[in-house]
Every structure is written in structure tokens, then in C-alpha cells.
Image: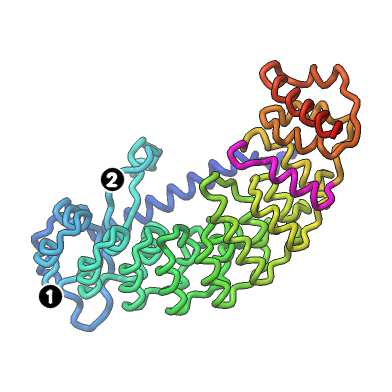
Amino acid sequence: MSGESFVFTAAALHSLQRDQDLLDQDRHRRQLAQRRLSNYVPLAARRPPQNGAARPPTLCRDPVVHNALYSGDLEALQRLFPAGSSANLTLEPQGGDMLWFPSGAGLCALAWEEELTTALHVAAGRGFASCLRLLLQRGADVDQAPGGCTALHQACSCSQTESTRLLLLHGADANALTDGGLAPLHVCTEQQSLECARYLLQFGAAVGARSVEEEDTPLHVAARGGLPDHVELYLRHGAAVDRANREGLTPLNAACAQPQQARDLPRYFQVCKRLLEGGADARTMDRDRRTPLHLACKSVNPEVVELLLASGACVNEMDYGGETPLHNILKVACFNLDHEPHRVVRALLNYGAIRVWPGALPKVLQLCSPSPRCLEVLLNTYSRLRVTEAWREALPPRALQGALQAVLTFLRLLKT
């Protein structure tokens, strides 16, 4: 190592960046603290500047104001913010994680992280529409984002339709980005946020907007979240169905790759169906040459696998690791028994998947022993097999009985 340079590890660089973020946050907090509101009584006496200039936000820690906002007490807010007063407030609630914050003496002290927000964020996120309307009428800055996101992001992430509508009607930016580079459409991640997404598109939100870090479009977000109605909405507004993100995933790849609970399988089937009907390519590959069929086999969604195969997916395509979709399902079958993995294996074999080499069957028996039905489907594809001692050694004692039952079923079929 030369005397003029120093090699930082990834952990050291991350720690330095975190320290810098904390210093920036503390500096921002101190700047806001110069305009501190300490009592709610003078609040009503505050008037906007006579020259019409926008009033800068005031930092408010008053518990009376906080309680009225967080409880949605409209009558209290009307008393606190009479006509002519300003509701352009930045709030500083306590909570969150314990972190080291720099002190004025150049030392660091352990304290609660203080996340800045606004009165609009509180009302919008909790669906207090009447309170939100009052705050907007009292001059609250609709696009203020002291905590890194706007009130519109807060309303959309909480699926508050009326709050979203009111903010947009009062000029909220439908394409504003958070500090993490997300537009409001990117935070519509729940089924209940469909109407929020509709309003955003009506007020000019870009359906093809990309997130800064992952380069996801709203269609990626909807597909990954298993939101078929959102997918249909974005496609009707011209979303690019095969646009890839930074990892090379199209919305179809993203939907197939998402881990899924058994109750979520029908939703993801509907998502994939609508994407394919919208022109998605069933053979598209990500950077690791994994197709949607590879990914659907890993998530063990039988309906999606059958849909992809019927749409022209290549059943024997290999990824960069040399694995086919059949390899993927055999690896994870024992972890997703409630997904009926044998249906995936059967569909792949029916569409011409190359059978497992007989010499590798002991390994397959070991992997799939908790799913005798998968073993039965596999064994039924052979006209003859040589059962060796390696078969018994590959199976744990508890699984041996199930595997033997599958073999006996296979032998009975041979006799018939």
C-alpha cells in the first residue's frame, strides 16, 4: 500500500456514508429549529406575509397540535388554525431507532432518531380528509418533503384514496420523487391503492417512470406485488410490457420470481395472464439467462407454469448455471408441498422436459423424499429402472416408506 492512498473496505465506506447522512440530517434539523414553535396559543396570531410570499415551514413540537393532528380532531384544528393563519408546519415526533447523533461540542451521543414529517403527511396517511382539506386551505405546502417523501407518497402508500384526490386537486406533483427515487405510482403496492393509481394517472403521473436505484416501472411494482387490476390499468395507459429493470427483469420475470404463499398463487396467475395477453414475451431472459419458466418453477406456481408452457416457453432452456426449469422445481419441491409441486413436474414432462438421468435418481430421491407424488410422477416416465442400494441410502428413514410406495405404484403400472 502506498503512502498516498488508503483502501477502504465496503463496510468502512458504508459506515462513512451513514455518518455523513447523520451529519446532514442533524444540520437540517438545526436549521429548522431556528424557527421553532413552542406553544400553540400564538399559532392563531400568525399571519402570512402581506407581500404574498410563501411562508417557510415552522418546526412544531407542541403536543396539543400533535394530538389534534394524530387523532383527526377537526374542531381542535379549526381553533388552532383559524382563517388567515398558516398551517405550513414541520413536525418532529420522537421514536424510531436509537442512533448516534453529533452534539454541538463535537461529540456523539446516543439518542432517538427524529424523523421529520408535516401536518399534511399525518392527515393524508391516516385518511383524515376533513382535516387535510382544512390544512390545505390554511396554506400547507403540498409538496413539502422533510422526511424524504411528500404527503402524496404517504397517502398512496397507505391507500388513502380521498387524501390522494385532495392533494392532487391542490396541485401536488404526481411525479415527485422520494429521496430513494420513487414516484407516487411506485408506492401503490396494495390492492386497495388502485383508485389512488387511477387518480395519479388522471393528474399526469408517468406510467413509465423508473425508480432511481432499481429502474423499476410501476408495472414492475404491480407485477411483483401480485396486483392484477393495477397491471391492467397500467397496460391500458400504455405501459411498456417488456421493459427490463436494472437486473434485467421484465414485469413478467418479476412476477414469476416473487416468493408466493399458497393463497397468493391465483393473484400471480392473473398477473401473468394479463401480461401475456398484453404482449409479454414468455421466453425473455434476465442477466442470468433465467426465463419466466425458470422463475415460476422456483416459486412453485403450477397454474403459471402451465400458462407459460402453453404460451411458448422453452421447457429445456438452460440458465448460466446449466439448470433447466425441471432442476429448479426438484430443488424446492420439498419446501412448498402445499403448492402441489408434482403438478409442475408433470407439466414440464408433458411438454417434453428431458428426464433425469437414472444415475442421478438417488440424489433426486433425497431432495424430493417429502413429496412422494413428485417421485411417482418422475418414475412413471421410465419404462424400466434398476433399483440399487444407493436408493435406500439416499432416503432418510421417515421418507423411505413413502418412496417405496411410489416405487410399488410404478411397478404395478408396469404390470398393467
Earlier in the chain: of badge 2 and badge 1, it is 1
Q: Is residue 261 magenta?
A: no
Percent coordinates x, y for residue 64 in the rendering: 14, 53
Label the magenta part by its dominant secondary structure: helix
Q: Which residue is mark 2?
A: 94
Q: Nearer the viewer, residue 38 or 258?
A: 258
Percent coordinates x, y for residue 320 in the rendering: 82, 48
Quick one: SS at disc 2?
Answer: loop
Q: Which residue does the image show at 73% across and 53% down from the upper left?
A: 293
Q: Nearer the viewer, residue 30 or 296?
A: 296
Q: Nearer the viewer, residue 356 or 250?
A: 356
Considering every residue shown, the one lying at the far bottom of the view is: 51
Q: Report whether 59 appears left or right of 84.
A: right
What segment is highlighted magenta in the picture?
Answer: 337-353
Instruction: Compute the Cα span from label 2 to label 1.
Output: 30 Å
Numbered mark located on residue 336 in the image: none
Q: Quadrant of the N terminus?
A: top right
Q: Is residue 107 visible?
A: no
Looking at the rendered structure, the kind of residue marked 2 is Gln
Indicate whether 178 appears above or below 288: below
